[in-house]
Amino acid sequence: MNDNYKILTPVQLQLAFLSSAVKNIKYIEGVNPFLIDINGERAFIYIKNLSPAQLTNNNHDVWRIQLPVRDEFESIKKSSALFVLLGYDSTNEVYTTWNPYWCKQRLNVGKSVSMYSRLSLQQRVSKKGEIEQLDLNNDGNVICIPRNRISEFLVNIKEYYPQETVFIAKGSIIQKRQNKQNEAEEIYELFKDEIDDADGFFQFLINDGVSKKSSRDYCRHISNLIKSGFIDRYKEIFLKRNSLSEYADAIYELLHIDEVAALDKQKHGYFRTSLRHYLDYLLSKSKCSSINEDTPQIVSELKDPVYKRNEFGQLIALDNEIKKTLAKYVIDEDYPDYDEMINICSSYYPDFILDKMSYTDWIKLFENTNWKKSHTSPNRKTNKTSAKIRTKTIRVTRPDGSIIQHGFVVDTYIEVIKESYPDLIMEMGLYHAGVNIVSREYDEKYKAYQKDIGEGYLVMVNSTTEAKYEDLCFINKELELGLKVELIDKDRINIETPRGEYTKNNGERYKIRVTFPNGRTIQYGKVLETLVEVVKYAGPQNVASLNINVCFENMVLRTPLEKYKIACKPVGDGWYVNTASDTTSKYKQICEISERLNLGLIVELV
């Protein structure tokens, strides 16, 4: 490590720069930051001493400067002039710099914003005398310039940052793209700047049925995401789209960048949900916008489609626009991310559709959808029964060695929460899409994804498998439950089917689907929950009068025997239903209840 690096004063840094920058560079005013003229165009220059970053991993090659909060930065940020941030290594006599448009956006967003370089790069450039660029991954690109070539670099800065590919500050010195690209720029500016109209976004959310608390959270998170520079940093993702209606794809791509995904995970999915609500808001406004002639027509298709539904109000086909968005999750994918697809659909479809669709209904709809035949790989298996739902699943082992692991991760998630003091979990403040994972009230927007687990508690299941895994790990640790929570490959496990659970030829367990006379359909991940729901619907006292035998006693009873206590589930008014029977027996029991009480249920083993 080089401990002999020199620290120059702000005035010395400015004088060193001006003594080298002579070609086509004219000083105007100021002392670091100072204003200059570059071939007739103005730019602010701000120079800091480069120094070792002193990271905990003792990587002596990492150097940096830190961008402080300064009052004068506010006027620079609002100006039309370019902002060039320079780090100076006085020992090697080289400058480092970063994307000027992104740096300008980062002014005064934090107490100390770090910009990184590498000592090895600085030494190499000093030795060779050549301008060199280095990709630092999440820290962006850094360009290193010999001191005697700083004028050359500034005069040709457009060559290093062509057409503002990462960020365009309003009114900057570079002309905006023409034709289609100009449209993309305007749409992007609309996307980024509309957050200034926070009242409009908030009112849109309220009108859309979102609670006031969630609406305030969405506004705050969108504002933070945009103002922190994350959107600008990955502007090129949005500039590839020439229509606001295509921004759903851009948001998907943004959220799959590692650092954004990590931030979204840290915020329990708030960023992804906020972005989708924000896009809905902009699409609704763009109906009367002239930015893109195609947009009003597309918005109309998005917002006013004729939904294809069955007699019970459930979707039987996806709309073309949402189908195009979802196709990337399925085509040539052995493990479609159905959780993410459901999340997207929940932001696309209105509440009266979501209210009719269960988690299982979505899965079946996706499996029965024809995803662009012409794009399907010829070697791809087309038998839907051979498709795997997702790469990962969750296995939870109790302290006594028993295992909780269902075909659907959501059922494992619900069972663990149900067994693990939901009242305490509710106080932990774990949220997905702005909804507490355990609550006592339905959320207007996401009530279709809140599952009743009894005793007045609802579990929010609108989250990815990884998020559910993290929730269970956190709950296990906080409550000291002694569980072993594992995120494992679904295709590499072979859990023996518990005795009494009947399976299909392909290994899937049968489920029971029940359709009520009013059109409501239930099909829970655990068949015992379907039986419990039917008994509640029929009335436990009425079912008790039928004397259906389970374990040598009435299936519905007041006082369960000790050995069947766990299997006996409450169904109201002090009654319990004994669920200690296999799937086929439960199917027959439900059929008998319906027939003898004349309930008119449609009961299917699926």
Image (tube, rainbow, N blue to C red):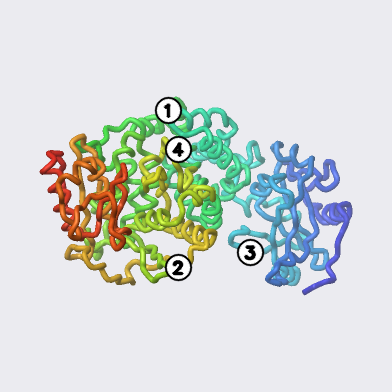
Q: CA distance from mark 4 to mark 2?
A: 45 Å
Q: Going from the N terminus, do you reach mark 4 or mark 2 first?
A: 4
For label 4, the crowd category at 10 Å Cα-Cα, with few meaning under 14, some 14 to 19 and many 20 or more, is many
Q: Could you tell me the amino acid type at mark 2?
A: Lys
Q: Could you tell me the amino acid type at mark 1?
A: Lys
Q: Which image quadrant: the C terminus?
A: bottom left
Dot 2: what SS? Answer: strand
Q: CA distance from mark 3 to mark 1?
A: 44 Å
- Where is residue 190 shown, x and y percent of the image? 53, 35
Q: Going from the N terminus, do you reach mark 2 or mark 1 first?
A: 1
Q: CA distance from mark 3 to mark 4?
A: 33 Å
Dot 4: what SS? Answer: helix
Of the two numbered discs 3 and 2 in the rendering, the one whose residue sits closer to the viewer = 2
In the picture of the structure, the residue carrying the numbered disc 1 is 287
- Where is residue 107 shown, x and y percent of the image? 71, 45
Q: Which mark is residue 134?
A: 3
For label 3, the crowd category at 10 Å Cα-Cα, with few meaning under 14, some 14 to 19 and many 20 or more, is few
User: Residue at point 17% right, 53% down?
Assistant: 587
Q: CA distance from mark 1 to mark 4?
A: 11 Å
